[in-house]
Every structure is written in structure tokens, then in C-alpha cells.
Image (cartoon, grey):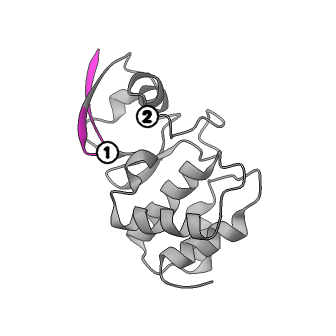
Amino acid sequence: MAYELNVNGKAMTADVDADTPLLWVLRDTLGLVGTKFGCGIAQCGACTVHADGAPIRACVTPVEAIGAAQITTIEGASALEVGARVQKAWSELDVAQCGYCQPGQIMSATALLAENPTPSDADIDAAMAGNICRCATYVRIRAAIKRAAGQEA
């Protein structure tokens, strides 16, 4: 079946089965490979994208559940003012080590700051708890979120 999707502000069509996870639609059908596969069970956060600004796990979200939601991927994050700030802070603080989890980390951080522009450490911990970094760059992630919020760590 053909699904009309709004991804990063562009109308796109994906002719896939209804239960195809959004992750594979983005990567395999639409060619947006920034969103990563990590665990396939919504536990690691590598596949985080936004649906109408809210972070979701693309690995377990069937394309049929998207409807008219505006999907934003890491490729579109810099078009958001807060997303551009987060990406700039990530770069300035050299957050990424291997980098594999970073698209999901950035998308979760962007959603956090869009909802709460001045998060406490507890707010950051809660928002980022579902994102795993095997390189353990958590201290730099928190510092980058603080910098993007205008609160130096």
C-alpha cells in the first residue's frame, strides 16, 4: 500500500506493507539513513525520530500508525532552531566517540529542549534515559544539552 508521509517538511510516498517499521521505510525506501538500527525493541534509542515534535522509536512504530504526523529525522533536525543549537553544541564539545547512537541522542535532546528550554540535570536524565551510548559519552551529552540551553555545565 502507498503511504503519503511528511518527512522533514517534504511530501514523500512509500509503497510498503502497513506493518513495516518506520525505521525501514526511512532507511530502505526513502534513503534517509541517518536514523540508525540499534536493538529493534525500542530499548536503545538509536532510531529516535520526532512525530509532530515528540520523540518516538522508529524501530517499533509501524508506518500505518504515522498518519498525517510530521516526521523529523536527524537529516531535518538542523532546520529546527533548537535542533541547530543542539547539533552545534554536540560539535563544539566533541560529544560523539563512535557516533552510532548520536542521531538518536540528538533527536531526544532536541525534543527535550523544545519542550523544556532550561532543563535541570534530573530533567536531562529523565529525557535521555532511553538512549544508550556504548562509548559512555554521557558527561559530554549532558554538557552539550546544557550548552544548547544556554546553561554552561
- Vertical position of residue 12 compared to residue 142: above or below: above
Of helix, strand and loop, which one carries label 2?
A: loop
| Contact? badges 1 and 2 (CB < 8 Å) | yes
User: Which segment is the magenta one?
Assistant: 1-11
Q: Is residue 86 left or right of residue 126?
A: left
- Vertical position of residue 119 compared to residue 33: above or below: below
> For residue 140, which numbered disc appears in the image?
none
Residue density around tag 2, few if under 14, some if 14–19, many if 20 or more, within 10 Å: some
Query: Looking at the rendering, which quadrant does residue 5 occupy?
Result: top left
In the rendered image, which quarter contains the N terminus?
Answer: top left
> For residue 32, which numbered disc appears in the image?
2
> For residue 8, which numbered disc appears in the image?
1
Chain-order first, disc 1 or disc 2: 1
Q: Is residue 143 left or right of residue 137?
A: left
- Vertical position of residue 108 compared to residue 99: above or below: below
**Residue 72 at x, y percent in the picture:** 37, 47
Q: Amino acid at mark 1?
A: Asn
